[in-house]
Image (cartoon, rainbow, N blue to C red):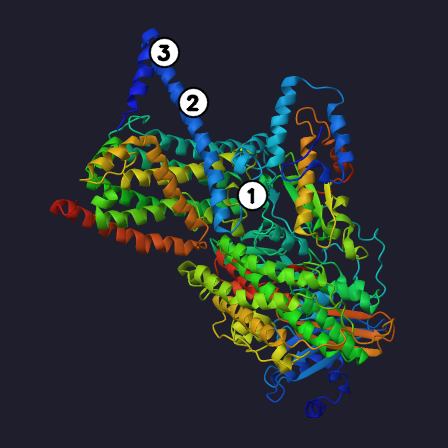
């Protein structure tokens, strides 16, 4: 099964083995025809309509604006409906450094996103802490507090890299089973169990 | 002009030939309901796509072009996505009102659909006070917005709802008065009557100066009614995140999203009805052959083209102007539009009495 | 300089003077407030602009170095105040003299734990309230166990503390109310579309009218100044690109100038010209982004796309030479790191042609619009006195009538040879701030026009030793970025890395003035004012 998205040939993607593995998992136990086709339809819709949350902390955010502008135009793929409210967004693009004071805020934003939700860590800082790794106030990657689906390295990544990252997310969505929970949530549930919020009430 | 009521009469005859009358009526109601819902959904999807393409064109971009040919399936994909999104229930809110609000908004715009003159003979219901009914039901929407803002138990939504309340209440006046101006000109409140009255010349031409003033005020107030830029204060993204629907997710948010576009259609549809003859083709007195040619274009197409063209103007506003501030918004209505509108009504009455119109 | 020294020495016998790149006055804390008042209020001195407060830990004592400038005479002075008490370090506040001191002193308190007697608000500024220790102290415990990543939310406080001296001279702690219990407090940020990053403004509103704003910073505080202390000088350069990423070139230019000043290095002419051209390209691109985001904040989304269209052409030029779109890493100690791209001159010429047309287009779409005028005229008026007192420099300061362009007042590089006007307006409102930036784009284009055909041949970088060691001492250098006067302070003990490096960012002062500017304005005006100040949050938080 060639999992691809419109606008880029299958061979051009770099990590096809990973997606193949996910696709195999998806097909492992066979599928009811009705549920299967319904899944396909839903996944077609989901993977073609990925709305980002407008969330940016530093330089990567400016590149994210550039991604929306005329030259890179993410509207071509239907990603331009950037929602300011996390309830209505599909994924959070962590664009920029996450520091200690911001960590609970990012976690809350993640919790406020409506299911199904995804995370793209954009830029060196969100991936691993980047140039500020040794600081007393910087997280070594946003993966410490929320589960990340796609990592986009760079400082800041070029808009092309961001497009590639979101396309990869779109491909990941296609090899999920919406009914029956294959390839989704199992790692996440565990992650969230291991990173509890100490005190949810203000 | 081909009368489409032939079709509806044929369906009615067919059904009543083998059904008792009560069943016929029930079936017809169901059919109309399903039909309306379908039109509603298709129109909304079209409008979302239309706006995204138009906005892209204004901004030197391409807009959606990957999903389906020219990206036409983009809004369909969005619809699937929104349908399966989680509906988040909040703590410390009035759950009943919270769930009720999006439905109120959607019902308001749906009721308005019932009296729109879709084409020659296809109008769900033809009241003698049709336009009055339209204004009445379109005000229900503000109730939904107020409820949404209040029941979310969030300060941003509350401010958004209050802004919306102030805005709607003010601009209803302008809408009402400019409609009144045209009703006075036509001498009828019935929607079909309004359309028939424009058989020879559209009101925007026959009513000349007062009609044009009324049209301009109507289109400004209509933009405000639909909460669109430059009057999008209730959901001003840079001020109130997403305004009154900040806390809504999934299809509840989808309802608000759809209703915004459908209201846009309704406002432009009513403008088409009042000033551009509804479904009536363009007739120029004296040019008989031209009029006959125009008559060949189906009435439904006429209506849709007029509505979409007017919507284009409203979309154009949004992507050109900056947003107003709340006090400027209110002073625009109360200090400028309302007095002008009142004078315009007097002018119109004068013109009717003196017969200075075409 | 001698004149100033005499005037001070006459009045303050305790003052000791050191010559450096600026005159440094040593004064005991007990006399500091009197000296501050003397410096500000004596007509022949009138040091009315507090440039920076640099908190210091000299291991044996804590203290601050204050940098002052007189806007009237364009003279500079620095004052060193220290306390030997390491347990309870306390200094006297100067908030009553310079408004900007309030936020500067909070920063010093946050990093060094120095309490300022008389500052009305002694809370932490960047770090969480439950943070343990003061990170910039040399004996700070860096163990991550002490300050782990906390996922619980900070408690929201409506009160703060202040320290005041009573009649006997004893310092007592007092509570200060920020918000009354029945205030309607809206929390804007840190994740909000209009705060241009992660700024948090707790806003008390009365209907739509703003009563008070409480500013929270630190949501992107990366501790860059502390990180610099462990790195060699060439390694510290890359952080400047990530402070105010929209004036990356200018920031880095500043740090390079400061290090070159300390080394006594002569930069080749070619490198100087290239640096100035890059600075001006950067300034245009930053102002273009300002126009775009500001208009978007006001609801005119389409302008963003037009402004970004021109910005992309600048990024193309920069990318061809530097290889990056945002963090360029281009200036280096002694010059620039790589030679210009072969198409550079042609590209810049092309750009010079399209820019005036584009500005005409912006004016047509936005500047003349009635709604835009209604939204901006008379909104957020900042008087000249307040601009100086709050340290609001850059285009925002110049919109208030304060001629504060470092390129004119203290020219660096080759700016003294160039012909350009300093744009100064007097209205001080949001419209003036917007128009100043538009006019500055034109002036930057003018500078580019003068230089594009006159790039001399020669070396691009001076001979710099492999290991950069600065002599003992401290230096302060300012340049004009797109947002205002950006300053770099370096203190060296003669090693390969600084003992203290401080970036004095213009955005910090802009953020400090928000509360003052928005009192009594509408919520929508807050967005206008914030947008027109054009701060960049990573620049504020560092």
Residue with the mark numbered 2: B34
Asked which secondary structure carries label 3, the reply is helix
- State the separation of the CA atoms marked 2 and 3: 16 Å
Check if mark 2 and mark 1 are on a common chain.
no
Image check: B194 left or right of B109? Answer: left
The residue under the point 51% across, 45% down is B243
Chain ID of residue with mark 1: A
Residue with the mark numbered 3: B23
- State the separation of the CA atoms marked 2 and 1: 29 Å
Asked which secondary structure carries label 1, the reply is loop
Mark 2 surroundings: few (<14), some (14-19) or many (≥20) residues within 10 A = few
User: Is C316 or B133 nearer to us in this picture?
Assistant: C316
The residue under the point 43% across, 27% down is B37
Q: Residue C215 carries which label?
A: none
- Residue A46 position by quadrant: top right
Task: Determine whether C229 is above or below A87 in the image.
Answer: below
Observer-side mark, 1 or 3, equals 1
Q: Which residue lies furthest to the top in this view?
A: B18
Residue A95 x, y percent position in the rendering: 68, 50
């Amino acid at each position: 099964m060639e999992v691809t998205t419109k606008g880029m040939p299958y061979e051009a993607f770099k990590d096809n083995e990973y997606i193949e593995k996910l696709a195999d998992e998806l097909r492992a136990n066979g599928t009811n025809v009705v549920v299967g086709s319904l899944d396909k339809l839903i996944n077609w819709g989901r993977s073609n309509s990925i709305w980002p949350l407008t969330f940016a902390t530093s330089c990567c955010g400016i590149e994210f604006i550039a991604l929306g502008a005329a030259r890179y135009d993410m509207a071509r793929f239907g990603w331009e409906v950037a929602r300011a409210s996390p309830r209505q967004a599909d994924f959070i693009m962590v664009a920029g450094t996450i520091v200690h004071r911001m960590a609970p805020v990012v976690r809350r934003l993640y919790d406020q996103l409506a299911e199904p939700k995804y995370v793209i860590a954009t830029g060196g800082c969100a991936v691993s802490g980047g140039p500020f790794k040794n600081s007393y106030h910087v997280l070594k990657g946003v993966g410490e507090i929320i589960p990340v689906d796609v990592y986009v390295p760079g400082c800041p990544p070029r808009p092309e890299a961001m497009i590639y990252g979101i396309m990869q997310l779109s491909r990941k969505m296609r090899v999920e089973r919406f009914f029956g929970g294959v390839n989704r949530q199992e790692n996440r549930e565990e992650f969230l169990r291991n990173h509890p919020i100490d005190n949810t009430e203000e | 002009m081909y009368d489409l009521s032939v079709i509806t009469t044929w369906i009615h005859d067919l059904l009543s030939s083998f059904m008792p009358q009560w069943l016929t009526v029930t079936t017809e109601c169901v059919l109309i309901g399903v039909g309306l819902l379908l039109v509603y959904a298709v129109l909304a999807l079209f409008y979302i796509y239309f706006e995204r393409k138009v906005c892209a064109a204004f901004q030197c971009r391409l807009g959606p072009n990957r999903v389906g040919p020219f990206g036409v399936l983009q809004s369909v994909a969005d619809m699937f996505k929104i349908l399966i999104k989680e509906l988040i229930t909040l703590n410390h809110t009035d759950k009943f009102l919270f769930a009720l609000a999006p439905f109120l908004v959607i019902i308001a715009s749906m009721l308005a659909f019932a009296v729109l003159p879709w084409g020659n003979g296809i109008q769900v219901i033809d009241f003698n006070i049709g336009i009055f009914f339209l204004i009445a039901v379109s005000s229900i929407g503000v109730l939904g917005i107020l409820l949404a803002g209040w029941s979310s138990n969030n300060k941003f939504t509350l401010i958004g709802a209050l802004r919306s309340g102030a805005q709607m209440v003010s601009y209803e006046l302008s809408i009402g008065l400019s409609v009144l101006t045209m009703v006075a000109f036509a001498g009828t409140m019935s929607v079909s009557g309004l359309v028939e009255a424009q058989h020879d010349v559209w009101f925007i031409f026959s009513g000349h100066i007062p009609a044009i003033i009324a049209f301009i005020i109507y289109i400004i107030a209509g933009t405000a009614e639909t909460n669109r830029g430059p009057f999008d204060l209730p959901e001003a993204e840079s001020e109130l995140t997403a305004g009154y629907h900040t806390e809504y997710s999934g299809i509840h948010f989808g309802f608000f999203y759809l209703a915004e576009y459908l209201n846009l259609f309704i406002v432009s549809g009513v403008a088409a009805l009042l000033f551009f003859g509804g479904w009536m083709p363009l007739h120029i007195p004296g040019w008989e052959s031209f009029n006959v040619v125009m008559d060949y274009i189906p009435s439904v197409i006429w209506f849709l083209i007029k509505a979409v063209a007017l919507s284009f103007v409203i979309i154009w506003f949004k992507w050109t102007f900056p947003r107003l501030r709340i006090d400027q918004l209110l002073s625009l209505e109360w200090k400028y539009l309302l007095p002008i509108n009142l004078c315009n009504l007097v002018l119109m009455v004068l013109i009717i009495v003196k017969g200075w119109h075409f | 300089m001698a004149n100033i020294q005499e005037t001070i020495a006459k009045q303050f016998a305790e003052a000791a003077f050191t010559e450096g790149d600026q005159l440094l006055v040593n004064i005991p804390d007990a006399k500091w407030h009197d000296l501050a008042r003397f410096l500000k209020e004596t007509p022949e001195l009138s040091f009315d602009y507090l440039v920076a407060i640099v908190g210091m830990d000299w291991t044996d004592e804590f203290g601050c170095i204050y940098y002052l400038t007189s806007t009237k005479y364009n003279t500079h002075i620095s004052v060193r105040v220290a306390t030997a008490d390491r347990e309870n370090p306390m200094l006297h506040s100067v908030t009553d003299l310079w408004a900007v001191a309030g936020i500067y002193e909070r920063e010093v308190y946050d990093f060094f734990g120095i309490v300022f007697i008389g500052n009305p608000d002694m809370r932490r500024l960047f770090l969480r309230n439950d943070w343990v220790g003061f990170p910039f102290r040399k004996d700070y415990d860096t163990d991550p166990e002490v300050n782990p990543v906390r996922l619980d939310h900070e408690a929201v406080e409506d009160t703060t503390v202040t320290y005041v001296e009573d009649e006997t001279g004893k310092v007592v702690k007092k509570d200060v109310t920020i918000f009354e219990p029945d205030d309607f407090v809206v929390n804007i940020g840190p994740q909000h579309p209009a705060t241009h990053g992660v700024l948090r403004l707790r806003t008390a509103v009365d209907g739509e009218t703003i009563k008070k704003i409480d500013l929270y910073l630190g949501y992107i505080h990366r501790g860059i100044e502390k990180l610099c202390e462990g790195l060699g000088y060439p390694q510290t350069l890359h952080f400047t690109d990530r402070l105010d990423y929209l004036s990356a070139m200018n920031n880095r230019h500043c740090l390079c100038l400061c290090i070159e000043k300390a080394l006594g290095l002569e930069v080749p002419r070619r490198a100087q010209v290239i640096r100035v051209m890059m600075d001006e390209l950067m300034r245009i691109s930053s102002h273009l982004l300002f126009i775009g985001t500001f208009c978007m904040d006001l609801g005119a989304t389409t302008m963003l796309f037009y402004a970004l269209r021109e910005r992309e052409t600048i990024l193309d030029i920069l990318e061809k030479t530097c290889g990056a779109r945002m963090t360029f890493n281009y200036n280096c100690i002694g010059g620039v790191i790589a030679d210009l791209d072969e198409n550079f001159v042609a590209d810049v010429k092309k750009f010079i042609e399209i820019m005036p047309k584009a500005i005409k287009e912006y004016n047509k779409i936005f500047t003349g619009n009635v709604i835009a005028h209604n939204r901006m005229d008379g909104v957020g008026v900042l008087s000249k006195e307040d601009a100086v007192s709050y340290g609001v420099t850059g285009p925002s300061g110049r919109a208030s009538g304060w001629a504060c362009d470092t390129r004119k007042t203290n020219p660096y590089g080759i700016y003294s040879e160039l012909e350009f006007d300093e744009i100064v307006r007097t209205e001080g409102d949001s419209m003036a701030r917007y128009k100043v930036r538009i006019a500055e784009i034109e002036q930057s284009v003018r500078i580019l026009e003068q230089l594009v055909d006159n790039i001399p041949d020669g070396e691009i970088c001076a001979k710099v030793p492999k290991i950069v060691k600065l002599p003992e001492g401290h230096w302060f250098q300012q340049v004009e970025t797109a947002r205002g006067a950006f300053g770099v302070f370096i203190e060296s003990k003669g090693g390969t890395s600084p003992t203290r490096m401080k970036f004095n960012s213009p955005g910090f002062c802009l953020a400090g003035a928000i509360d003052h500017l928005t009192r009594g304005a509408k919520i929508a005006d807050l967005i206008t004012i914030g947008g027109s100040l054009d701060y960049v949050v990573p620049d504020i938080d560092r």
